[in-house]
Image (cartoon, rainbow, N blue to C red):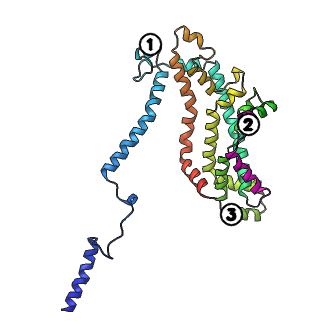
Amino acid sequence: MSAVTDSAVTDERPRAAGRKAPGRWAAPPRPVWEEEPHRAGLAGKGIALGLACLAVLFPLWIVVVTSLSTKQTISDAGGLVLVPRDLTFIAYQELLSGGQVTRATVVSLGVTVVGTLFSMTVSILCAYGLSRIGSLGHRWFLMTLLATMFFGAGLIPTYLLVQSLGLTDTYLALILPSAISVFNILVLRAFFMGISPELTDSARIDGAGDWRILWQIVLPLSRAVIAVITLFYAVGYWSAWFNASIYLSDQDMMPLQNVMIQLVQKQEPPVGLGQAIRAGQLSALAVQMAVMVLALLPVAFLSPFVQKHFKKGMLTGAVKG
């Protein structure tokens, strides 16, 4: 009788565990984020993402369609155009025909390319030096950089310094005052410190110096974070307008963002287009939207190429070190 009872109890335990009955055989509850998603939850997430994409793409659609619309279409719509009709590229043709907008676009491209190369060079060298623990003045330089993140000289001293150096009305005034970002240097430094020290130590044993280690070992392993920081600097230079507004007085030297401000906010047509707008050949609103599209194109073109590196570069640089 006792054997039969023990056998029944033994046979009952797996079935009880299979039913997840309370007791020491029950499986511990899983966290909420490990539970299987419900259909309602998936549908809600899809709707939320769809609305977010619509909120971003709908204004962009209106800007692009309006820039491609004729003056009559814009007049019939009473302003911004939602439904495309009689599309034309006349606004872009006039903007890129050699007037102020063309010159401003070339200035913005030049400042962005030169400024990004200069900023990346200085930031990489500074970050690599700070990532070598025990290097000369390591702690002092690091504390000085960190202090600049919380305490700044202010606008007036910065302007007086740029003026005393003779940089006003020069393109260097668009690059040097904002050439270095301490945040970007710290991200690069954290990433460099996360590289295995065995690699650099073996290179030093083979006779490699710091320059060769940086060029042949550190930089190839840091492509993700370098791509992200390059995008940060490039977008910053391309979108910058404040330095030009206070350091430049020559309208021919103004970058594209400042021309767009004059066109959209101050309602001042670019040089060479005022007569066309007054003659009725162009709509001022179409010109404004076309300049906005030109300002957005470089960022929209570069972002997909850097997107695959963004998560790895930022998270690794933020966690390690």
Q: Which element type, helix, strand or loop, lies under badge 2?
A: helix
Can you tell which quarter of the image residue 248 is in? top right
Q: Which element type, helix, strand or loop, lies under badge 1?
A: helix
Q: Quadrant of the C terminus?
A: bottom right
Circle 1/circle 2 CB separation < 8 Å: no
The residue at which mark 2 appears reads as 176
Q: In x, y percent, where is residue 180?
A: 70, 42
Q: CA distance from mark 3 to mark 1?
A: 67 Å
User: Please, what is the three-letter code of the amino acid marked with disc 1?
Assistant: Gln
Can you tell which quarter of the image residue 254 is in? top right
Circle 3/circle 1 CB separation < 8 Å: no
The residue at which mark 3 appears reads as 197
- On the rendered structure, is 55 left or right of 100? left
Which residue is at 68% across, 39% downward?
Answer: 116
The disc placed on residue 72 is 1
Task: Indicate which label's residue lies in the foreground, 1 or 2.
Answer: 2
Which residue is at 20% across, 87% downward?
Answer: 5
N-terminal of the pair, mark 2 or mark 3, is: 2
Bounds of the magenta span?
Answer: 133-156
Magenta stretch holds residue 181: no
User: Please, what is the three-letter code of the amino acid marked with disc 2?
Assistant: Leu
Which residue is at 69% across, 20% downward?
Answer: 251
- On the rendered structure, is 48 left or right of 11? right
Q: Main secondary structure of the magenta part?
A: helix
Task: Indicate which label's residue lies in the foreground, 2 or 3.
Answer: 2
- On the rendered structure, is 148 left or right of 36? right
Which residue is at 66% across, 53% downward?
Answer: 220
The vertical placement of 248 against 71, above or below, is below
The vertical placement of 318 against 49, above or below, is below
